[in-house]
Image (spheres, rainbow, N blue to C red):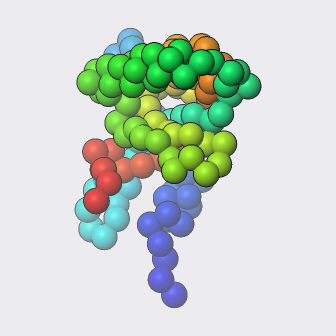
Amino acid sequence: MKITLNFLVLLLLTTAVYAQEADSTAQPETFEFEWAGEKTTMQKYFIVFLKSGPERSQSQEEAMKLQQEHLAYLGDLYEKGIINLNGPTDGQTDIRGFSVYNVATKEEAERLAKNDPMVKAGRLVVEVHPWWLAKGSGVK
């Protein structure tokens, strides 16, 4: 029977001792494990789902302005290394897009996500979930 990496990660999460960096600033939770003979650092990231909000009655001009501000805001967080992945969905559900935040806490991810101009205007709302991923991994 083939054991998947995801299953192993979940199994390890139930028994792992989590590490925090020793300095005074909060750091994301991490733990070490070995996969296929290689040591890997797993890190807790936060997926922020951007969902359709209750206030979508803005004019087309206002919606375009908010979209530009939204992209600039997320781009700035990406440039600062706060967001690692970011993008829209196909728009077929209420989930309009998502971002992967590289921050220490769910509260910090929520605070940053709620400062997005589209969220402040009510066009989008956020839903935040922790997500464990091999540190430094990316889309292949």
Q: Residue placed farthest to the front in the image?
A: 60
Q: Tell which of 58 and 54 is nearer to you.
A: 58
Q: Residue at x 33, y 44 (%)?
A: 135
> Most extreme residue toward the right, as rendered?
54
- In the image, taking residue 82 as reference, residue 89 lies left or right, namely right
**Residue located 38% across and 30% down the image:** 83
Which residue appears at 67% of the width and 25% of the height?
56
Q: How many marks?
A: 0
From the top left corner, tell me how far across and down residue 72 is, in percent.
35, 20
Q: Is residue 114 left or right of residue 87?
A: right
Taking depth in this image into account, of 121 and 99 the one nearest to the observer is 121
Residue 53 occupies quadrant: top right
Percent position of residue 61, x then y: 50, 17
Q: Is residue 135 visible?
A: yes
Q: Position of residue 44 (x, y in %)?
A: 47, 39
Image: 64 above or below 44:
above
Q: Measured along the vertical axis of the image, is residue 43 above or below residue 107?
A: below
Report the side of 120 relative to 5 (left or right): right
Residue 130: in sight, yes or no?
no
